[in-house]
Image (cartoon, rainbow, N blue to C red):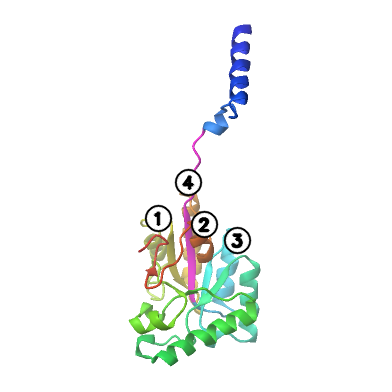
């Protein structure tokens, strides 16, 4: 026993003399890699379903990103946006009118984005840096005239009333990957997606995923959004 104690002390002394820390089980253990995903919601803000989505996120202690339509921002829904920020979520741009933007002129495209970005900044104090095109419809003119990172996302047809909460959850949970952005909707009456989150979030947590905002996703993955790319996963090119 004495010789073992002597050898251990000598080992630690050598490590100290070499400027290295003595090895410990904790130090030698491999670090667990992060598995990050983002829940994102389109077509708010409103005082019904958006509130229910926030309540569900709060229930599970997670955050998400809300892509809002400028024309939906009013005095009442602005208070919901403030709560969104207070919860650690973020608010991003989904155009002013939710029109088919490839049909618009360059000036009209700029106006759609500017209006909504100004409204978001006015209400939350934070300017949006991401944009989801309505209907995921994109053309070159949009890339040339919108100075925001384009986001798509992995959806589950949750705008279709006939798709059940269980079906929505099954689609999202089919093959989640680190860096994924999930495309969901908080439009009025979309209660099935609220219910789906009660399945999705616990299961993804069980699989080791952490929920972050789209802003944090890019930051923590050390990815700088590139122009001309529409991201469904932060590592898309």
Measure how far apart labels 4 and 3 are at the Cα level: 26 Å
Q: Quadrant of the N terminus?
A: top right
Which element carries disc 2, helix, strand or loop?
A: helix
Residue 177's disc is: 1
Above/below status of 206 relative to 180: above
For disc 2, the marked residue is 220
Mark 3 or 1: in front is 1
Q: Earlier in the sequence, mark 4 or mark 3?
A: 4
Which element carries disc 3, helix, strand or loop?
A: helix
Of the pair 160 and 212, the residue shown nearer to us: 212
Residues shaded magenta? 29-42
Mark 4 or 3: in front is 4
How far across and down, in percent of the image, does residue 73 sit? Answer: 58, 85
How far across and down, in percent of the image, does residue 173 sit? Answer: 40, 58
Measure how far apart labels 4 and 1 are at the Cα level: 13 Å
For label 1, the crowd category at 10 Å Cα-Cα, with few meaning under 14, some 14 to 19 and many 20 or more, is few
Q: Quadrant of residue 83?
A: bottom right
Mark 3 or 2: in front is 2
Is residue 194 rendered to the left or right of residue 10?
left
Q: In the rendered structure, does residue 102 fall within the stretch colored magenta?
A: no
For disc 4, the marked residue is 33
For label 2, the crowd category at 10 Å Cα-Cα, with few meaning under 14, some 14 to 19 and many 20 or more, is few
Q: Quadrant of residue 182?
A: bottom left
Of the pair 183 and 188, the residue shown nearer to us: 183
């Amino acid at each position: 026993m004495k010789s073992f104690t002597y050898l251990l002390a000598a080992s630690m002394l050598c490590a100290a003399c070499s400027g290295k820390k003595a090895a410990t089980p904790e130090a030698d253990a491999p670090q667990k890699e992060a598995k990050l995903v983002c829940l994102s919601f389109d077509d708010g803000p409103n005082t019904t379903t958006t509130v229910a989505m926030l309540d569900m996120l709060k229930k599970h202690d997670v955050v998400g990103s809300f892509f809002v339509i400028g024309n939906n921002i009013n005095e009442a829904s602005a208070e919901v946006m403030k709560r969104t920020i207070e919860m650690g979520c973020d608010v991003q741009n989904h155009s002013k009118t939710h029109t088919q933007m490839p049909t618009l002129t360059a000036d009209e495209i700029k106006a759609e984005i500017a209006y909504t970005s100004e409204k978001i900044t006015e209400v939350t104090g934070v300017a949006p840096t991401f944009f989801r095109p309505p209907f995921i419809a994109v053309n070159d003119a949009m890339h040339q005239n919108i100075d925001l990172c384009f986001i798509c996302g992995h959806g589950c047809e949750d705008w279709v009333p006939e798709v059940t909460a269980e079906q929505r959850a099954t689609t999202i949970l089919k093959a989640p990957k680190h860096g994924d952005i999930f495309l969901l909707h908080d439009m009025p009456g979309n209660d099935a997606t609220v219910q789906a989150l009660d399945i999705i979030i616990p299961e993804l947590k069980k699989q080791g995923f952490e929920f972050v905002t789209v802003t944090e996703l890019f930051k923590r993955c050390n990815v700088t959004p590139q122009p001309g790319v529409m991201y469904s996963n932060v590592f898309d090119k």
